Image (spheres, rainbow, N blue to C red):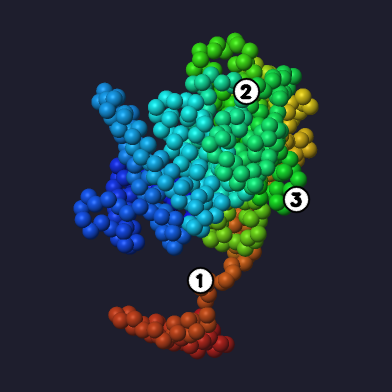
């Protein structure tokens, strides 16, 4: 029948719409449609509805939706009136408050009728359906008592709902039960216990076991014990919520220790430690996935939330910071927040390794590959930014600023991640052929890790911030090599730029064999020959040009042929005058 799923979906729609009155109208419309479909619509207006029977539910389980829609319609009406009272307290009247409480009582009445129907074997309901119906009715009864400020009745009702949901959570592992516990039931139990001035070292599970109404719900107790015989045992410590048994009695931060008096913090710490041990027990391949960190982060976040709530409660009671209870909670806050930050850093470092390994698979070049590589580098830079922001949060934890040794260790770790970030940005500039920028960034990265790595055994070491001396020396050596390489590349770029501006040694080597390069003006851009060859003019003087000269005539001067013939005649006349007789007569 899935009662909890049906109710959760309705209330989720209320959160999405942001208006309980709209949800109320939606329930009315769906209720009218369902009555028509089931043949239970009234032929006359304002006529009384025929009562539901267990046979009707047994024949068609959809009949229970009639009671659920009616109950949720009344509940939405009550929440709408409550929101109006919260928005404008000046308009709040005793009548409006009483009306809101009456709507909750009507919702509880419909839920009780549902429990009665499902308890009948004719309805063919399972034990799970019966437990869900009783938990739903108990939560509505607790809400009514809470609005009336009947704190003990509220604890009794919510304790019944919590025990049932805890048993269902252990048996079915449905997260909807956990949502009901964390969103409504547990906060209501804590506030009611605060109003009754119950001891603060009592956890929610202990209070639920103590105030569970066993006499009024004997049948329910039988079903609960059949599913989980140890649910009412005193040794059980918040098993459904923390996911582990046991508790933590004290915490240690460097040379200081503090007892853990709050039961919720104690159980949350035990749960976080158990989840950590489960993570370390995984194989290297499983531990390298980002999903493996989700449970650890969630467990430590619960410990952080429990500690923050305990501190807020003491501040609400005007407890001074010098009080020993506040000092213990401050130290506990430092421990849990530091652990949460370290695991966040660990997850980010694993993600960076995955991105780097994925980027090495593409060996071919080209614009598309370059764009992908730039995208990977951008993701790595974003993760390094998140790591540096997490380290900045460590400085703000209580007691960290006064610890010089620990702050030095943090400075060295921050320098390591800053150097890694600068090196990644330098790679992106190198891909874009901005070698000067890459050299400047690599030089900056080298300056970060120029100081020796600080390491102390007294400082708590976590997976996320583990940086040994070998790792620090490795990045220092690699950065030195990259700086030297890019210095040579930048120098070559400078020489090529000077050569291009002078233009003296432009062209391939084959075209300037008669020139000797002076100084450092080497041209690295051109090769020995031009390849592929290009069509270019070549200065030549073929024989046919000289022959053609004899046949060219120009207008006006007889042309070059006449000149040539005149010269030939003169040369012949001189030849005739010459000789032995010619020379004599000529004298």
Considering depth in this image, is 563 or 96 the residue closer to the camera? 96
**Quarter of image, res 301:** top right
Q: Is residue 33 visible?
A: no
Q: Sequence order check: which comes first, mark 2 or mark 1?
A: 2
**Quarter of image, res 358:** bottom right
Within 10 Å of disc 1 (Cα), the crowding (few <14, some 14-19, many 20+) is: few
Considering depth in this image, is 465 or 209 the residue closer to the camera? 209
Q: Is residue 180 left or right of residue 487?
A: left
- Report the residue marked by disc 3: 283
Q: Is residue 563 visible?
A: yes
> Considering only vertical position in the picture, is 163 above or below 373?
above
Q: Is residue 21 left or right of residue 376?
A: left
Considering depth in this image, is 448 or 150 the residue closer to the camera? 150
- Report the residue marked by disc 1: 536
Q: Sequence order check: which comes first, mark 3 or mark 2?
A: 2
Q: Residue at x 56, y 51 (%)?
A: 127
Label 1 residue SS: loop
Q: Marks 1 and 3: which is nearer the front? A: 3
Label 3 residue SS: loop
> Considering only vertical position in the picture, is 218 above or below 505?
above
Q: How many angstroms separate mark 2 from mark 1 (CA)?
A: 95 Å
Considering depth in this image, is 452 or 165 the residue closer to the camera? 165
Q: How many angstroms separate mark 1 from mark 3 (CA)?
A: 68 Å
Q: Residue at x 50, y 43 (%)?
A: 134
Q: Residue at x 49, y 17 (%)?
A: 316
Residue 525 at x, y percent in the picture: 59, 57
Q: Residue at x 60, y 16 (%)?
A: 326
Residue 482 at x, y percent in the picture: 68, 44
- Report the residue marked by disc 2: 201
Q: Are marks 3 and 2 in contact (CB under 8 Å)?
A: no
């Amino acid at each position: 029948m899935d009662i909890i799923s049906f109710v959760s979906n309705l209330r989720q729609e209320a959160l999405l719409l942001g208006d309980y009155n709209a949800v109320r109208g939606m329930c009315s419309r769906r209720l009218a449609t369902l009555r028509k479909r089931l043949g239970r619509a009234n032929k006359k207006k304002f006529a009384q509805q025929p009562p539901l029977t267990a046979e009707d539910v047994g024949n068609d389980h959809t009949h229970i939706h009639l009671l659920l829609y009616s109950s949720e319609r009344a509940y939405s009406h009550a929440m709408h009136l409550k929101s109006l009272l919260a928005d404008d307290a000046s308009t709040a009247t005793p009548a409006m408050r009483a009306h809101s409480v009456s709507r909750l009582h009507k919702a509880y009445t419909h839920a009780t009728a549902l429990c009665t129907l499902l308890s009948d074997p004719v309805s063919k309901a399972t034990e799970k359906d019966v437990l869900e119906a009783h938990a739903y009715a108990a939560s509505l009864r607790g809400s009514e008592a809470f609005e009336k400020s009947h704190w003990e009745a509220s604890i009794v009702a919510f304790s019944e709902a919590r025990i049932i949901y805890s048993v269902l959570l252990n048996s079915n592992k449905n997260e909807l039960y956990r949502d009901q516990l964390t969103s409504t039931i547990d906060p209501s139990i804590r506030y009611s216990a605060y109003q009754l001035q119950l001891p603060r070292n009592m956890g929610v599970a202990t209070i639920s076991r103590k105030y569970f109404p066993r006499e009024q719900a004997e049948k329910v107790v039988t079903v609960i014990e059949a599913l989980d015989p140890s649910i009412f045992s005193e040794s059980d410590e918040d098993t459904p919520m923390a996911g582990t048994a046991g508790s933590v009695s004290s915490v240690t931060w460097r040379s200081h220790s503090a007892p853990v008096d709050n039961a919720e913090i104690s159980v949350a710490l035990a749960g976080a430690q158990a989840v950590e041990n489960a993570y370390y027990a995984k194989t290297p391949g499983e531990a390298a996935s980002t999903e493996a960190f989700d449970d650890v982060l969630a467990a430590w976040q619960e410990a952080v939330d429990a500690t923050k709530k305990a501190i807020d409660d003491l501040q609400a009671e005007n407890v001074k910071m010098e009080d020993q209870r506040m000092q213990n909670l401050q130290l506990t806050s430092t421990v849990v927040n530091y652990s949460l930050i370290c695991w966040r850093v660990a997850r980010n470092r694993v993600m960076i390794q995955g991105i780097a390994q994925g980027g090495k698979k593409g060996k071919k070049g080209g614009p598309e590959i370059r764009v992908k590589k730039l995208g990977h580098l951008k993701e790595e830079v974003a993760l390094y930014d998140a790591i540096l922001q997490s380290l900045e949060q460590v400085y703000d934890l209580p007691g960290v600023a006064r610890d010089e040794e620990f702050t030095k260790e943090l400075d060295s770790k921050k320098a390591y991640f800053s150097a890694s970030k600068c090196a990644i940005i330098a790679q992106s500039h190198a891909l874009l052929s901005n070698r000067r920028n890459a050299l400047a960034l690599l030089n900056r990265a080298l300056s970060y890790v120029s100081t020796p790595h600080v390491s102390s055994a007294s400082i708590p070491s976590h997976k996320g911030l583990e940086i040994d001396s070998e790792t620090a020396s490795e990045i220092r050596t690699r950065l030195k090599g990259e700086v030297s390489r890019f210095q040579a590349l930048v120098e070559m770029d400078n020489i090529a730029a000077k050569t291009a501006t002078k233009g003296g040694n432009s062209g391939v080597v084959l075209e300037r064999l008669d020139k000797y390069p002076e100084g450092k003006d080497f041209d690295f851009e051109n090769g020995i020959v031009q390849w592929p060859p290009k069509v270019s003019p070549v200065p030549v003087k073929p024989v046919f040009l000289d022959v053609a000269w004899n046949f060219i005539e120009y207008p006006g001067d007889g042309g070059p042929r006449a000149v040539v013939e005149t010269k030939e005649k003169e040369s012949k006349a001189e030849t005739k005058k010459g000789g032995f007789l010619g020379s004599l007569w000529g004298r």
